[in-house]
Amino acid sequence: MSLLEVADLRATYGQGHVLHGISFAIDEGQIVSVLGPNGAGKTTTLRAVSGTVATTGRVVLDGRDIRGWSTDKIARQGIAHVPEGRGTFTELTVEENLRVGAYTRKNGVREDIARCYEWFPRLGERRSQHAGSLSGGEQQMLAVSRALMLRPRLLLLDEPSLGLAPLLTRELFGILEGIARDEGITVLIVEQNANLVLKFADYAYVLEAGRIALDGDAEQIQSEDAVKRSYLGV
Amino acid sequence: MKEFIQVTVDGLAAGSIYGSVALALVLIYRTTGIVNFAQGEMAMFSTFIAWGLIEANIPLGLAIVLTLVLSFAGGMAIERVIIRPVEGSDPLALVIVTLGLLILLNSGAGWIWGFNNRAFPSMFGDGRVDIGGVRISWESIGITAMTLGVVGLLFLLTQKTKIGLAMRAVSANPESSRLAGIRVGRTLAIGWGLAAAVGALAGVLIAPSLFLDVNFMGAVLIYSFAAATLGGFDSPMGAVIGGWIIGVTETLAGHYVDFIGADLKILVPLGIIIAVLLVRPTGLFGSREVARV
């Protein structure tokens, strides 16, 4: 059975962020990417899963329809969402940010914080600084770490490469892939940088104007130059 | 000199009360961004509850503890029933709602307990202690000590506990807090409950020095606004220090400056509010966000 199954998902809010009934499924342990141009509905897709936008249709996690549940309740089911703009708690310290990420848990929090500092030593060096004083790249690492502190079953990532230098982006993706594969975390990732994310994902969906234009194994999408040119602009 | 010290200590005690109510204002402002104009009336209502319990022959200490618990529950209820529906509205709407709450509590208290003055017993008696020739009332010492205790407890709560971390997270970023699994509504309600309890304590501490009636917290609230403005509306420690500065300044001015006296000393906090807003709008201890993009 799939970990996450989305059926006939529709969403309307603001302007240009609309989903016209999309359906997809993600298996446990898979890394799945959602690609597509700006305004195609990528961010809305993630927000629909984490319950931060009103939707119709079905969002089934582990056989239970969680659509319409409150965001915090969905988070407590093990869905962590790194939102657009990173969602940093700027007035809290780096370490407090991580502890907020572990809010739903009781044990092993200290060990997991140490683990985050191993993955991202920069965060360890700045553990008692206000998170608002971190650079964009450091805040992105913090956002990812905060999400991992939830020990999620499903990790939703919204444009983790945004504002990062290319070298740093590759490093971040490398660390992310290692963690996801080691821990069996299922990942749904939205990215502009198709070339990069397709190297790391198993499967990809390409959205266009709120519909799934095509989908396939990441390698296959990667190899189809025509697809990449017409939908991804690379 | 002795007189000066005595007046200053009395000012510190009054300032502790202003600081406590200011602390309650800060607690709500930090978590919800609402300036709670009803804070004084909430404290007044709580003090009447304490008075009612004492009248029912419940011992003073127990009556106060019960009042704090009831006030906590009442504060949570106010958040849930009156504030939550308008949360996130524009600031003007929120101001109007808290003003409505002020009128509701004021008339409600009058309807239940009447508009007469009532005497409220003191926890500390009316004794004085002689320190190097300066006679300081136990009342002043007790009030100041209780305020310090409350500040200490709140500090431990917000800095060292999980619920405190959640409260700070919600005030920094409610949306991200939800994504971390925090029940934001419940956390805000706890903030209101704490503010109501802190205000209630200020009410029962000051009531013996004033007469308890439905308007007795009115002037206190103005001093407390001055304290919170001076200390910085987002700084708990600033609120208390601001309270002390206001309390001491007001008491000294009332005592030594002839034309101010007891009648005009309300001008002191108003003057301080205006001065702070002109010179340093964030207050002495208010933080400007540290940010780098």
Image (spheres, rainbow, N blue to C red):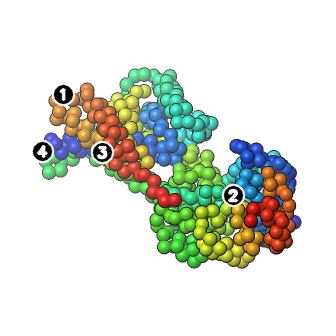
**In whole angstroms, how far apart are the C-alphas of marks 2 and 1?**
62 Å
Report if the CB atoms under discs 3 and 2 are less than 8 Å apart.
Answer: no
Please say whether residue B66 is visible from this viewpoint: no
**In whole angstroms, how far apart are the C-alphas of marks 3 and 1?**
23 Å
Both marks 4 and 3 on one chain? yes
Residue depicted at 49% across the width and 69% down the height: A127
Type of amino acid at the residue the image marks with label 2: Ala
**Mark number for residue B244?**
3
**In whole angstroms, how far apart are the C-alphas of marks 3 and 2?**
44 Å
Type of amino acid at the residue the image marks with label 4: Met
Residue beneath disc 1: B259
> Residue B227 location in percent, x, y?
35, 41
Residue beneath disc 2: A75
- Mark 4 and mark 1 lie on one chain; the one further toward the N terminus is 4
**Mark number for residue B1?**
4
Type of amino acid at the residue the image marks with label 1: Phe
What chain does badge 1 belong to? B
Residue depicted at 83% across the width and 66% down the height: A226
Both marks 3 and 2 on one chain? no
Type of amino acid at the residue the image marks with label 3: Trp
